[in-house]
Image (cartoon, helix red, strand yellow):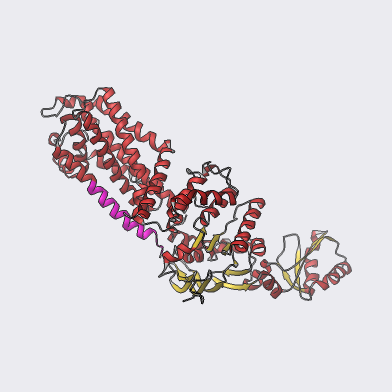
Amino acid sequence: MSPAVRTQVGQLARRSTLRTLRQPAQVVPALVFPMLLLAVNSGGLKDATNLPGFPTDSYLTFALAVPFMQGALFSVMNAGTDLARDIETGFLNRLALTPLRGMALLSGLLAGAVVLGAVQAVVYLTVGLIAGAEFAAGAGGVIVLVALSVSITVAFGSIGLFAALRGGSGEKVQGLFPVFFVFLFLSSMALPLELIQADWFRAIATANPISYLLQAIRSLLIEGWDIGELALGFAIAAALLAIGMLASSAALKTRLVRT
Amino acid sequence: MAITSDGVKPNGIEVEALVREFKKGPRAVDGIDLRVEPGEIYGFLGPNGAGKSTTVLMLTTLLPPTGGTARVAGFDIVSEGPRVRSAIGAALQDAALDPLLTGREHMRLQTALHGIAKDEREARGNELLERVGLSRAADRKVGGYSGGMKRRLDLALGLAHEPRILFLDEPTTGLDIQSRTALWEEVARLAAEDGVTVFLTTQYLEEADALANRVGIIDHGRIVAEGTPAALKAEIGRPTVEAVPHDPADHERMAAVLGRFGELAGASPKAAAVRLAGGESQLAEVVRALDAEGIAIEHLQLHAPSLDDVFLTKTGRSLEGAEEAEAEAEEAAAEEAGVA
Protein backbone atom coordinates (compact mmCIF):
# COMPACT_ATOMS: atom_id res chain seq x y z
CA MET A 1 0.00 0.00 0.00
CA SER A 2 1.52 3.34 -1.05
CA PRO A 3 1.92 6.14 1.54
CA ALA A 4 -0.75 8.17 -0.26
CA VAL A 5 -3.29 5.36 -0.11
CA ARG A 6 -2.35 4.69 3.52
CA THR A 7 -3.06 8.34 4.31
CA GLN A 8 -6.39 8.18 2.50
CA VAL A 9 -7.47 5.03 4.34
CA GLY A 10 -6.27 6.47 7.65
CA GLN A 11 -8.12 9.76 7.26
CA LEU A 12 -11.35 8.11 6.14
CA ALA A 13 -11.04 5.57 8.95
CA ARG A 14 -10.68 8.45 11.39
CA ARG A 15 -13.80 10.08 10.00
CA SER A 16 -15.76 6.83 10.06
CA THR A 17 -14.74 6.17 13.67
CA LEU A 18 -15.61 9.72 14.75
CA ARG A 19 -18.99 9.44 13.03
CA THR A 20 -19.74 6.18 14.80
CA LEU A 21 -18.72 7.50 18.21
CA ARG A 22 -20.66 10.74 17.70
CA GLN A 23 -23.89 8.95 16.88
CA PRO A 24 -25.14 7.30 20.07
CA ALA A 25 -28.28 6.42 18.11
CA GLN A 26 -26.12 4.04 16.08
CA VAL A 27 -24.17 2.53 18.94
CA VAL A 28 -26.78 2.19 21.67
CA PRO A 29 -29.39 0.11 19.76
CA ALA A 30 -26.62 -2.22 18.56
CA LEU A 31 -25.71 -2.81 22.20
CA VAL A 32 -29.12 -2.79 23.89
CA PHE A 33 -31.47 -4.66 21.55
CA PRO A 34 -29.36 -7.83 21.24
CA MET A 35 -29.11 -7.92 25.04
CA LEU A 36 -32.88 -7.62 25.40
CA LEU A 37 -33.38 -10.44 22.91
CA LEU A 38 -30.78 -12.49 24.76
CA ALA A 39 -32.70 -12.02 28.01
CA VAL A 40 -35.97 -13.10 26.37
CA ASN A 41 -34.52 -16.09 24.50
CA SER A 42 -32.37 -17.45 27.30
CA GLY A 43 -35.34 -17.27 29.66
CA GLY A 44 -37.90 -18.78 27.31
CA LEU A 45 -35.84 -21.53 25.70
CA LYS A 46 -33.78 -22.81 28.61
CA ASP A 47 -35.61 -26.17 28.55
CA ALA A 48 -33.89 -26.83 25.22
CA THR A 49 -30.82 -27.81 27.24
CA ASN A 50 -32.73 -30.98 28.25
CA LEU A 51 -32.64 -32.22 24.66
CA PRO A 52 -30.27 -35.15 24.27
CA GLY A 53 -27.09 -33.94 22.59
CA PHE A 54 -27.48 -30.27 23.54
CA PRO A 55 -23.89 -29.08 23.94
CA THR A 56 -24.28 -27.24 27.28
CA ASP A 57 -26.58 -27.10 30.25
CA SER A 58 -26.63 -23.27 30.09
CA TYR A 59 -28.91 -21.94 27.37
CA LEU A 60 -27.62 -18.45 28.18
CA THR A 61 -24.13 -19.56 27.16
CA PHE A 62 -25.51 -21.12 23.96
CA ALA A 63 -27.62 -18.05 23.14
CA LEU A 64 -24.83 -15.56 23.90
CA ALA A 65 -23.45 -16.12 20.39
CA VAL A 66 -26.61 -14.67 18.84
CA PRO A 67 -26.08 -11.02 19.95
CA PHE A 68 -22.76 -11.02 18.09
CA MET A 69 -24.63 -11.78 14.87
CA GLN A 70 -27.41 -9.30 15.64
CA GLY A 71 -24.76 -6.68 16.33
CA ALA A 72 -23.17 -7.46 12.97
CA LEU A 73 -26.54 -6.86 11.33
CA PHE A 74 -26.59 -3.39 12.86
CA SER A 75 -23.25 -2.76 11.18
CA VAL A 76 -24.91 -3.44 7.81
CA MET A 77 -27.32 -0.65 8.62
CA ASN A 78 -24.75 1.71 10.11
CA ALA A 79 -22.08 1.41 7.42
CA GLY A 80 -24.71 1.40 4.69
CA THR A 81 -26.74 4.37 5.90
CA ASP A 82 -23.57 6.41 6.51
CA LEU A 83 -22.44 5.89 2.94
CA ALA A 84 -25.97 6.41 1.60
CA ARG A 85 -26.05 9.75 3.39
CA ASP A 86 -22.75 10.69 1.74
CA ILE A 87 -24.31 9.89 -1.61
CA GLU A 88 -27.49 11.81 -0.86
CA THR A 89 -25.73 14.90 0.44
CA GLY A 90 -23.14 15.01 -2.34
CA PHE A 91 -20.27 14.34 0.10
CA LEU A 92 -19.27 11.40 -2.07
CA ASN A 93 -18.83 13.82 -4.97
CA ARG A 94 -16.59 15.97 -2.79
CA LEU A 95 -14.46 12.89 -2.15
CA ALA A 96 -14.59 11.98 -5.85
CA LEU A 97 -12.95 15.30 -6.71
CA THR A 98 -9.87 14.33 -4.71
CA PRO A 99 -7.31 11.73 -5.87
CA LEU A 100 -9.04 9.21 -3.58
CA ARG A 101 -8.83 5.53 -4.59
CA GLY A 102 -12.09 3.59 -4.53
CA MET A 103 -10.74 0.78 -2.37
CA ALA A 104 -9.31 3.33 0.09
CA LEU A 105 -12.76 4.86 0.41
CA LEU A 106 -14.42 1.52 1.09
CA SER A 107 -11.74 0.40 3.53
CA GLY A 108 -11.84 3.68 5.41
CA LEU A 109 -15.61 3.58 5.65
CA LEU A 110 -15.43 0.20 7.40
CA ALA A 111 -13.28 1.56 10.23
CA GLY A 112 -16.43 2.53 12.11
CA ALA A 113 -17.55 -1.10 11.86
CA VAL A 114 -14.24 -2.21 13.39
CA VAL A 115 -14.81 0.03 16.40
CA LEU A 116 -18.43 -1.02 16.71
CA GLY A 117 -17.50 -4.71 16.42
CA ALA A 118 -14.90 -4.43 19.16
CA VAL A 119 -17.16 -2.48 21.52
CA GLN A 120 -20.03 -4.88 20.90
CA ALA A 121 -17.89 -7.93 21.63
CA VAL A 122 -16.67 -6.53 24.94
CA VAL A 123 -20.15 -5.39 26.03
CA TYR A 124 -21.94 -8.61 25.02
CA LEU A 125 -19.36 -10.81 26.70
CA THR A 126 -19.28 -8.71 29.86
CA VAL A 127 -23.07 -8.67 30.18
CA GLY A 128 -23.24 -12.38 29.40
CA LEU A 129 -20.65 -13.28 32.02
CA ILE A 130 -22.35 -11.10 34.63
CA ALA A 131 -25.63 -12.87 33.82
CA GLY A 132 -23.99 -16.25 34.42
CA ALA A 133 -22.79 -17.40 31.00
CA GLU A 134 -19.66 -19.52 30.73
CA PHE A 135 -16.60 -18.76 28.66
CA ALA A 136 -14.60 -21.92 28.17
CA ALA A 137 -11.73 -20.45 26.16
CA GLY A 138 -10.41 -18.35 29.04
CA ALA A 139 -8.62 -15.00 28.89
CA GLY A 140 -6.83 -15.70 25.60
CA GLY A 141 -10.15 -16.52 24.03
CA VAL A 142 -11.42 -13.00 24.69
CA ILE A 143 -8.93 -11.63 22.17
CA VAL A 144 -9.97 -14.22 19.59
CA LEU A 145 -13.64 -13.50 20.26
CA VAL A 146 -13.12 -9.75 19.76
CA ALA A 147 -11.16 -10.44 16.56
CA LEU A 148 -13.91 -12.75 15.31
CA SER A 149 -16.61 -10.21 16.20
CA VAL A 150 -14.71 -7.47 14.37
CA SER A 151 -14.22 -9.72 11.33
CA ILE A 152 -17.91 -10.59 11.17
CA THR A 153 -19.00 -6.97 11.73
CA VAL A 154 -16.67 -5.67 9.02
CA ALA A 155 -17.78 -8.40 6.61
CA PHE A 156 -21.43 -7.51 7.15
CA GLY A 157 -20.55 -3.81 6.97
CA SER A 158 -19.15 -4.35 3.47
CA ILE A 159 -22.53 -5.72 2.42
CA GLY A 160 -24.07 -2.54 3.82
CA LEU A 161 -21.69 -0.50 1.66
CA PHE A 162 -22.75 -2.47 -1.40
CA ALA A 163 -26.43 -1.90 -0.60
CA ALA A 164 -25.80 1.84 -0.21
CA LEU A 165 -23.90 2.11 -3.47
CA ARG A 166 -26.54 0.17 -5.39
CA GLY A 167 -29.57 1.75 -3.74
CA GLY A 168 -28.21 5.24 -3.16
CA SER A 169 -30.48 5.95 -0.20
CA GLY A 170 -30.63 5.20 3.49
CA GLU A 171 -34.18 3.90 3.16
CA LYS A 172 -33.09 1.21 0.72
CA VAL A 173 -30.30 0.11 3.04
CA GLN A 174 -32.68 -0.06 5.99
CA GLY A 175 -35.01 -2.18 3.88
CA LEU A 176 -32.38 -4.92 4.06
CA PHE A 177 -32.63 -5.28 7.82
CA PRO A 178 -35.65 -7.65 7.84
CA VAL A 179 -34.06 -9.74 5.09
CA PHE A 180 -30.93 -10.25 7.16
CA PHE A 181 -33.00 -11.04 10.21
CA VAL A 182 -34.75 -13.81 8.28
CA PHE A 183 -31.32 -15.23 7.43
CA LEU A 184 -30.45 -15.13 11.11
CA PHE A 185 -33.62 -16.98 12.08
CA LEU A 186 -33.01 -19.60 9.37
CA SER A 187 -29.74 -20.61 11.00
CA SER A 188 -28.60 -22.54 14.06
CA MET A 189 -29.56 -19.48 16.10
CA ALA A 190 -31.92 -21.31 18.49
CA LEU A 191 -30.69 -24.91 18.28
CA PRO A 192 -27.56 -26.76 17.17
CA LEU A 193 -27.83 -27.93 13.55
CA GLU A 194 -28.00 -31.61 14.48
CA LEU A 195 -30.96 -31.03 16.83
CA ILE A 196 -33.16 -29.23 14.28
CA GLN A 197 -35.97 -31.68 13.57
CA ALA A 198 -37.61 -30.21 10.44
CA ASP A 199 -35.65 -31.45 7.43
CA TRP A 200 -36.21 -28.30 5.33
CA PHE A 201 -35.16 -26.05 8.20
CA ARG A 202 -32.05 -28.12 8.90
CA ALA A 203 -31.14 -28.10 5.19
CA ILE A 204 -31.43 -24.32 5.00
CA ALA A 205 -29.61 -23.77 8.29
CA THR A 206 -26.83 -26.12 7.17
CA ALA A 207 -26.37 -24.12 3.97
CA ASN A 208 -26.60 -20.80 5.80
CA PRO A 209 -23.11 -19.38 6.53
CA ILE A 210 -24.47 -17.60 9.60
CA SER A 211 -24.78 -21.02 11.28
CA TYR A 212 -21.00 -21.49 11.06
CA LEU A 213 -20.28 -18.00 12.32
CA LEU A 214 -22.49 -18.78 15.32
CA GLN A 215 -20.73 -22.11 15.82
CA ALA A 216 -17.32 -20.42 15.78
CA ILE A 217 -18.40 -18.03 18.53
CA ARG A 218 -20.07 -20.84 20.50
CA SER A 219 -16.95 -22.94 20.28
CA LEU A 220 -15.14 -20.31 22.37
CA LEU A 221 -18.02 -20.05 24.82
CA ILE A 222 -18.83 -23.72 25.25
CA GLU A 223 -15.92 -25.91 24.14
CA GLY A 224 -12.83 -23.79 24.59
CA TRP A 225 -10.51 -24.04 21.61
CA ASP A 226 -11.89 -25.78 18.51
CA ILE A 227 -9.47 -24.74 15.81
CA GLY A 228 -11.63 -26.23 13.05
CA GLU A 229 -14.74 -24.27 14.05
CA LEU A 230 -12.74 -21.08 14.55
CA ALA A 231 -10.94 -21.41 11.23
CA LEU A 232 -14.24 -21.99 9.45
CA GLY A 233 -15.77 -18.94 11.15
CA PHE A 234 -12.86 -16.67 10.22
CA ALA A 235 -12.80 -18.11 6.69
CA ILE A 236 -16.50 -17.43 6.18
CA ALA A 237 -16.10 -13.88 7.53
CA ALA A 238 -13.15 -13.34 5.18
CA ALA A 239 -15.12 -14.75 2.23
CA LEU A 240 -18.11 -12.51 3.01
CA LEU A 241 -15.78 -9.53 3.28
CA ALA A 242 -14.12 -10.36 -0.04
CA ILE A 243 -17.48 -10.74 -1.76
CA GLY A 244 -18.80 -7.57 -0.13
CA MET A 245 -15.75 -5.53 -1.09
CA LEU A 246 -15.65 -6.81 -4.67
CA ALA A 247 -19.36 -6.12 -5.12
CA SER A 248 -19.00 -2.70 -3.47
CA SER A 249 -16.00 -1.87 -5.61
CA ALA A 250 -17.96 -2.68 -8.78
CA ALA A 251 -20.97 -0.72 -7.52
CA LEU A 252 -18.71 2.24 -6.67
CA LYS A 253 -17.46 2.33 -10.25
CA THR A 254 -21.06 2.56 -11.43
CA ARG A 255 -21.99 5.12 -8.78
CA LEU A 256 -18.92 7.29 -9.31
CA VAL A 257 -18.97 7.97 -13.01
CA ARG A 258 -16.02 10.36 -12.80
CA THR A 259 -13.85 10.21 -15.91
CA MET B 1 -3.69 20.77 -27.08
CA ALA B 2 -3.87 24.15 -25.44
CA ILE B 3 -0.39 24.79 -24.10
CA THR B 4 1.28 28.15 -23.74
CA SER B 5 4.66 28.85 -25.27
CA ASP B 6 6.43 28.17 -21.98
CA GLY B 7 4.77 24.78 -21.77
CA VAL B 8 2.42 25.71 -18.94
CA LYS B 9 -1.17 24.68 -19.29
CA PRO B 10 -3.35 27.77 -19.10
CA ASN B 11 -6.01 28.19 -16.45
CA GLY B 12 -8.80 28.51 -18.97
CA ILE B 13 -11.79 26.46 -19.99
CA GLU B 14 -12.60 25.62 -23.60
CA VAL B 15 -15.88 23.92 -24.44
CA GLU B 16 -16.99 22.82 -27.89
CA ALA B 17 -20.41 21.42 -28.77
CA LEU B 18 -20.77 19.86 -25.33
CA VAL B 19 -23.83 17.64 -24.99
CA ARG B 20 -25.36 15.67 -22.17
CA GLU B 21 -28.35 13.58 -23.01
CA PHE B 22 -30.16 11.42 -20.48
CA LYS B 23 -31.89 8.15 -21.23
CA LYS B 24 -35.26 9.20 -19.93
CA GLY B 25 -35.02 12.93 -20.33
CA PRO B 26 -34.34 15.74 -22.74
CA ARG B 27 -30.90 17.01 -23.65
CA ALA B 28 -29.92 18.75 -20.44
CA VAL B 29 -27.00 20.37 -22.24
CA ASP B 30 -27.49 20.78 -25.95
CA GLY B 31 -24.27 21.56 -27.75
CA ILE B 32 -22.79 24.49 -25.87
CA ASP B 33 -19.61 26.33 -26.85
CA LEU B 34 -17.83 28.60 -24.45
CA ARG B 35 -14.39 29.82 -23.53
CA VAL B 36 -13.29 31.12 -20.17
CA GLU B 37 -10.04 33.04 -20.09
CA PRO B 38 -7.45 32.54 -17.34
CA GLY B 39 -8.17 34.69 -14.29
CA GLU B 40 -11.66 35.51 -15.50
CA ILE B 41 -14.87 35.20 -13.50
CA TYR B 42 -17.39 33.67 -15.86
CA GLY B 43 -21.01 33.84 -14.76
CA PHE B 44 -23.22 31.04 -16.06
CA LEU B 45 -26.70 32.40 -15.66
CA GLY B 46 -29.97 30.61 -16.13
CA PRO B 47 -33.10 29.40 -14.39
CA ASN B 48 -33.27 26.16 -12.41
CA GLY B 49 -33.01 23.21 -14.75
CA ALA B 50 -31.49 25.17 -17.62
CA GLY B 51 -28.40 22.94 -17.67
CA LYS B 52 -26.02 24.91 -15.45
CA SER B 53 -25.31 22.18 -12.91
CA THR B 54 -25.11 19.48 -15.58
CA THR B 55 -22.46 21.57 -17.32
CA VAL B 56 -20.52 21.96 -14.07
CA LEU B 57 -20.72 18.23 -13.35
CA MET B 58 -19.27 17.52 -16.80
CA LEU B 59 -16.52 20.13 -16.53
CA THR B 60 -15.53 18.82 -13.10
CA THR B 61 -15.36 15.27 -14.56
CA LEU B 62 -18.18 13.95 -12.36
CA LEU B 63 -20.48 13.26 -15.31
CA PRO B 64 -19.25 12.12 -18.71
CA PRO B 65 -20.59 14.09 -21.66
CA THR B 66 -22.48 12.27 -24.38
CA GLY B 67 -21.08 14.55 -27.07
CA GLY B 68 -18.62 17.34 -27.73
CA THR B 69 -15.34 18.11 -26.04
CA ALA B 70 -14.06 20.28 -23.25
CA ARG B 71 -10.65 21.12 -21.88
CA VAL B 72 -10.20 22.42 -18.39
CA ALA B 73 -6.80 23.83 -17.46
CA GLY B 74 -5.64 22.39 -20.77
CA PHE B 75 -6.75 18.83 -19.96
CA ASP B 76 -9.47 16.87 -21.69
CA ILE B 77 -12.35 16.23 -19.30
CA VAL B 78 -12.90 12.68 -20.59
CA SER B 79 -9.43 11.27 -21.17
CA GLU B 80 -7.54 13.26 -18.52
CA GLY B 81 -10.02 13.29 -15.62
CA PRO B 82 -7.46 12.93 -12.78
CA ARG B 83 -5.38 15.81 -14.18
CA VAL B 84 -8.45 18.00 -14.46
CA ARG B 85 -9.39 17.23 -10.87
CA SER B 86 -5.92 18.10 -9.62
CA ALA B 87 -6.20 21.53 -11.24
CA ILE B 88 -9.70 22.44 -10.10
CA GLY B 89 -11.56 23.15 -6.92
CA ALA B 90 -15.30 22.98 -6.64
CA ALA B 91 -18.14 23.94 -4.37
CA LEU B 92 -21.10 22.11 -5.84
CA GLN B 93 -24.77 22.81 -5.27
CA ASP B 94 -25.83 22.43 -1.63
CA ALA B 95 -22.69 22.51 0.50
CA ALA B 96 -21.75 18.83 0.81
CA LEU B 97 -20.49 18.68 4.36
CA ASP B 98 -20.57 16.13 7.15
CA PRO B 99 -22.69 17.54 9.98
CA LEU B 100 -20.88 15.37 12.53
CA LEU B 101 -17.41 16.72 11.74
CA THR B 102 -16.01 20.09 12.75
CA GLY B 103 -14.76 22.65 10.27
CA ARG B 104 -11.18 21.85 11.22
CA GLU B 105 -11.76 18.11 10.76
CA HIS B 106 -13.16 18.81 7.30
CA MET B 107 -10.02 20.77 6.41
CA ARG B 108 -7.79 18.03 7.78
CA LEU B 109 -9.58 15.40 5.68
CA GLN B 110 -9.59 17.50 2.53
CA THR B 111 -5.93 18.50 2.72
CA ALA B 112 -4.89 14.91 3.45
CA LEU B 113 -6.92 13.45 0.59
CA HIS B 114 -5.34 15.97 -1.76
CA GLY B 115 -1.92 14.73 -0.76
CA ILE B 116 -0.72 17.84 1.06
CA ALA B 117 2.28 17.00 3.24
CA LYS B 118 1.39 16.17 6.84
CA ASP B 119 3.36 19.05 8.36
CA GLU B 120 1.67 21.56 6.04
CA ARG B 121 -1.92 20.40 6.48
CA GLU B 122 -2.71 22.19 9.70
CA ALA B 123 -1.20 25.49 8.56
CA ARG B 124 -3.05 25.31 5.25
CA GLY B 125 -6.32 24.45 6.97
CA ASN B 126 -5.93 27.26 9.50
CA GLU B 127 -5.06 29.74 6.77
CA LEU B 128 -8.17 28.89 4.77
CA LEU B 129 -10.44 28.87 7.83
CA GLU B 130 -9.08 32.29 8.71
CA ARG B 131 -9.59 33.54 5.17
CA VAL B 132 -13.28 32.59 5.16
CA GLY B 133 -13.81 33.87 8.69
CA LEU B 134 -14.38 30.53 10.38
CA SER B 135 -11.41 30.37 12.74
CA ARG B 136 -13.56 30.83 15.83
CA ALA B 137 -16.06 28.22 14.69
CA ALA B 138 -13.42 25.77 13.47
CA ASP B 139 -13.89 23.33 16.33
CA ARG B 140 -17.67 23.32 16.24
CA LYS B 141 -19.58 20.58 14.46
CA VAL B 142 -20.75 21.69 11.04
CA GLY B 143 -24.31 20.59 11.84
CA GLY B 144 -24.60 23.75 13.94
CA TYR B 145 -23.30 26.12 11.24
CA SER B 146 -25.55 28.64 9.50
CA GLY B 147 -26.10 28.39 5.74
CA GLY B 148 -23.55 31.12 5.13
CA MET B 149 -20.93 29.44 7.29
CA LYS B 150 -21.45 26.15 5.48
CA ARG B 151 -21.00 27.85 2.14
CA ARG B 152 -17.83 29.57 3.31
CA LEU B 153 -16.43 26.28 4.58
CA ASP B 154 -17.39 24.67 1.28
CA LEU B 155 -15.43 27.36 -0.53
CA ALA B 156 -12.42 26.90 1.77
CA LEU B 157 -12.46 23.15 1.14
CA GLY B 158 -12.52 23.76 -2.59
CA LEU B 159 -9.35 25.83 -2.20
CA ALA B 160 -7.45 23.31 -0.06
CA HIS B 161 -5.04 22.23 -2.80
CA GLU B 162 -4.62 25.71 -4.32
CA PRO B 163 -6.59 25.02 -7.51
CA ARG B 164 -6.07 27.09 -10.63
CA ILE B 165 -9.74 26.96 -11.57
CA LEU B 166 -12.67 27.14 -9.20
CA PHE B 167 -16.18 25.93 -10.00
CA LEU B 168 -18.92 27.39 -7.86
CA ASP B 169 -22.39 25.99 -8.47
CA GLU B 170 -24.96 28.45 -7.15
CA PRO B 171 -22.77 29.33 -4.18
CA THR B 172 -25.12 31.88 -2.65
CA THR B 173 -28.50 30.24 -3.13
CA GLY B 174 -30.47 30.54 0.07
CA LEU B 175 -28.03 32.91 1.75
CA ASP B 176 -28.94 36.24 3.32
CA ILE B 177 -27.62 39.44 1.75
CA GLN B 178 -24.77 39.79 4.23
CA SER B 179 -23.46 36.25 3.69
CA ARG B 180 -23.91 36.64 -0.05
CA THR B 181 -21.91 39.85 -0.14
CA ALA B 182 -19.12 38.33 1.96
CA LEU B 183 -18.85 35.40 -0.42
CA TRP B 184 -18.82 37.70 -3.45
CA GLU B 185 -15.94 39.65 -1.94
CA GLU B 186 -13.93 36.50 -1.36
CA VAL B 187 -14.55 35.19 -4.88
CA ALA B 188 -13.61 38.54 -6.39
CA ARG B 189 -10.44 38.60 -4.29
CA LEU B 190 -9.49 35.08 -5.41
CA ALA B 191 -9.69 36.09 -9.04
CA ALA B 192 -8.05 39.49 -8.64
CA GLU B 193 -5.23 38.62 -6.23
CA ASP B 194 -4.61 34.91 -6.72
CA GLY B 195 -5.40 34.73 -10.44
CA VAL B 196 -7.88 31.91 -9.95
CA THR B 197 -10.25 31.38 -12.86
CA VAL B 198 -13.82 31.16 -11.57
CA PHE B 199 -16.72 29.44 -13.30
CA LEU B 200 -19.77 30.50 -11.36
CA THR B 201 -23.32 29.34 -11.97
CA THR B 202 -26.11 31.43 -10.62
CA GLN B 203 -29.76 32.16 -11.00
CA TYR B 204 -29.32 35.58 -9.44
CA LEU B 205 -29.05 38.41 -11.94
CA GLU B 206 -27.40 40.74 -9.48
CA GLU B 207 -24.77 38.10 -8.68
CA ALA B 208 -23.75 37.73 -12.30
CA ASP B 209 -23.88 41.50 -12.71
CA ALA B 210 -21.76 42.18 -9.63
CA LEU B 211 -19.15 39.46 -10.01
CA ALA B 212 -18.75 38.22 -13.53
CA ASN B 213 -16.38 39.65 -16.11
CA ARG B 214 -18.43 37.83 -18.70
CA VAL B 215 -21.78 36.11 -18.59
CA GLY B 216 -23.19 33.19 -20.53
CA ILE B 217 -26.95 32.86 -20.40
CA ILE B 218 -28.20 29.31 -20.72
CA ASP B 219 -31.76 28.22 -21.41
CA HIS B 220 -33.01 24.73 -22.28
CA GLY B 221 -29.42 23.52 -22.46
CA ARG B 222 -28.33 26.12 -25.01
CA ILE B 223 -26.34 29.31 -24.56
CA VAL B 224 -28.63 32.06 -25.79
CA ALA B 225 -26.36 35.04 -25.08
CA GLU B 226 -22.79 35.65 -24.04
CA GLY B 227 -20.71 38.74 -23.31
CA THR B 228 -19.87 41.21 -20.60
CA PRO B 229 -22.91 42.24 -18.52
CA ALA B 230 -22.54 45.78 -19.85
CA ALA B 231 -22.35 44.67 -23.47
CA LEU B 232 -25.33 42.36 -23.11
CA LYS B 233 -27.44 45.11 -21.58
CA ALA B 234 -26.25 47.59 -24.17
CA GLU B 235 -27.32 45.14 -26.86
CA ILE B 236 -30.85 45.29 -25.50
CA GLY B 237 -30.38 49.01 -25.04
CA ARG B 238 -33.91 49.98 -24.15
CA PRO B 239 -34.94 51.07 -20.67
CA THR B 240 -38.33 50.15 -19.30
CA VAL B 241 -40.93 52.44 -17.77
CA GLU B 242 -43.23 50.82 -15.26
CA ALA B 243 -46.27 52.74 -13.99
CA VAL B 244 -49.08 52.03 -11.54
CA PRO B 245 -52.38 53.92 -12.06
CA HIS B 246 -53.96 55.64 -9.09
CA ASP B 247 -57.30 54.08 -10.06
CA PRO B 248 -56.92 50.33 -10.82
CA ALA B 249 -59.76 50.69 -13.35
CA ASP B 250 -57.37 52.73 -15.51
CA HIS B 251 -54.96 49.83 -15.87
CA GLU B 252 -55.98 48.89 -19.42
CA ARG B 253 -56.06 52.49 -20.63
CA MET B 254 -52.64 53.04 -19.12
CA ALA B 255 -51.27 49.98 -20.91
CA ALA B 256 -52.72 51.27 -24.18
CA VAL B 257 -51.01 54.64 -23.74
CA LEU B 258 -47.70 53.06 -22.82
CA GLY B 259 -48.00 50.79 -25.85
CA ARG B 260 -47.58 53.81 -28.10
CA PHE B 261 -43.96 54.17 -26.92
CA GLY B 262 -42.70 50.66 -27.56
CA GLU B 263 -43.19 46.99 -26.80
CA LEU B 264 -45.14 46.23 -23.62
CA ALA B 265 -43.07 44.37 -21.04
CA GLY B 266 -43.88 42.14 -18.09
CA ALA B 267 -44.83 43.97 -14.91
CA SER B 268 -46.42 43.40 -11.52
CA PRO B 269 -50.21 42.79 -11.63
CA LYS B 270 -51.15 46.36 -10.71
CA ALA B 271 -48.64 47.96 -13.09
CA ALA B 272 -48.08 48.28 -16.81
CA ALA B 273 -44.65 48.52 -18.38
CA VAL B 274 -43.19 49.43 -21.73
CA ARG B 275 -39.71 48.99 -23.17
CA LEU B 276 -39.06 52.47 -24.55
CA ALA B 277 -38.23 52.22 -28.24
CA GLY B 278 -36.68 55.68 -28.17
CA GLY B 279 -34.75 55.36 -24.98
CA GLU B 280 -34.80 57.35 -21.74
CA SER B 281 -35.57 60.64 -23.49
CA GLN B 282 -39.15 59.44 -24.03
CA LEU B 283 -39.90 59.47 -20.32
CA ALA B 284 -41.26 63.03 -20.34
CA GLU B 285 -43.47 62.22 -23.33
CA VAL B 286 -44.87 59.19 -21.49
CA VAL B 287 -45.82 61.31 -18.50
CA ARG B 288 -47.41 63.98 -20.71
CA ALA B 289 -49.37 61.33 -22.66
CA LEU B 290 -50.75 59.77 -19.49
CA ASP B 291 -51.66 63.22 -18.18
CA ALA B 292 -53.38 64.10 -21.45
CA GLU B 293 -55.54 60.97 -21.12
CA GLY B 294 -56.45 61.98 -17.57
CA ILE B 295 -54.79 58.95 -15.99
CA ALA B 296 -53.50 59.75 -12.53
CA ILE B 297 -50.22 58.03 -11.74
CA GLU B 298 -49.62 56.51 -8.32
CA HIS B 299 -46.11 55.28 -9.02
CA LEU B 300 -43.74 55.51 -11.96
CA GLN B 301 -40.28 54.05 -12.31
CA LEU B 302 -37.62 53.96 -14.99
CA HIS B 303 -35.60 50.73 -15.13
CA ALA B 304 -32.25 50.55 -16.86
CA PRO B 305 -31.89 47.36 -18.95
CA SER B 306 -31.05 44.35 -16.78
CA LEU B 307 -29.79 40.86 -17.49
CA ASP B 308 -33.39 39.76 -17.03
CA ASP B 309 -34.26 41.99 -19.99
CA VAL B 310 -31.51 40.24 -21.92
CA PHE B 311 -32.96 36.87 -20.95
CA LEU B 312 -36.45 38.02 -21.84
CA THR B 313 -35.32 39.28 -25.22
CA LYS B 314 -33.40 36.12 -26.04
CA THR B 315 -35.93 33.58 -24.80
CA GLY B 316 -39.26 35.38 -24.71
CA ARG B 317 -39.57 34.66 -21.00
CA SER B 318 -38.50 36.34 -17.80
CA LEU B 319 -35.72 34.60 -15.89
CA GLU B 320 -37.77 34.56 -12.70
CA GLY B 321 -40.68 32.85 -14.45
CA ALA B 322 -38.65 30.29 -16.34
CA GLU B 323 -37.58 28.14 -13.43
CA GLU B 324 -40.19 25.51 -12.75
CA ALA B 325 -40.58 24.32 -16.32
CA GLU B 326 -36.92 23.44 -16.59
CA ALA B 327 -36.25 21.81 -13.25
CA GLU B 328 -36.84 18.19 -14.34
CA ALA B 329 -33.85 17.85 -16.66
CA GLU B 330 -31.47 19.15 -14.01
CA GLU B 331 -32.87 16.71 -11.47
CA ALA B 332 -32.20 13.85 -13.89
CA ALA B 333 -28.60 15.05 -14.22
CA ALA B 334 -28.15 15.23 -10.48
CA GLU B 335 -29.57 11.74 -10.06
CA GLU B 336 -27.26 10.29 -12.69
CA ALA B 337 -24.22 11.91 -11.11
CA GLY B 338 -25.22 10.72 -7.67
CA VAL B 339 -26.04 14.14 -6.33
CA ALA B 340 -29.11 14.57 -4.20
Q: Is residue A7 visible?
A: yes
B166 up-or-down from B4: above or below: above
Does residue A259 sit above or below A14 in this rendering? below
Give the magenta part as a residue range: A238-258
Residue drawn at the location 56% of the way across and 52% of the way down: B151
User: Would residue A155 be counted in the magenta stretch?
Assistant: no
**Percent from the top left, x then y, of residue B138?**
54, 44
Q: Is residue A193 left or right of residue A117?
A: left
Locate residue B268, reporting x and y percent.
Answer: 72, 60
Q: Residue at x 24, y 39 (%)?
A: A148
B164 or B270: nearer the viewer: B164
Q: In which quarter of the view is residue A143 placed?
A: top left
Tell me what residue is drawn at x 26 percent, y 52 percent: A243
Q: Position of residue A187 (x, y in %)?
A: 21, 39
Prevailing secondary structure class for the magenta stretch in the rendered image: helix
| The stretch drawn in magenta includes residue A254 | yes
- Front one among A253 and B298: A253
Residue A142 image point, x, y percent: 24, 32
Question: A20 and B236: which one is in front?
Answer: A20
Image position of A162 (left or right of A60) = right
In terms of image quadrants, where is residue B22? bottom left
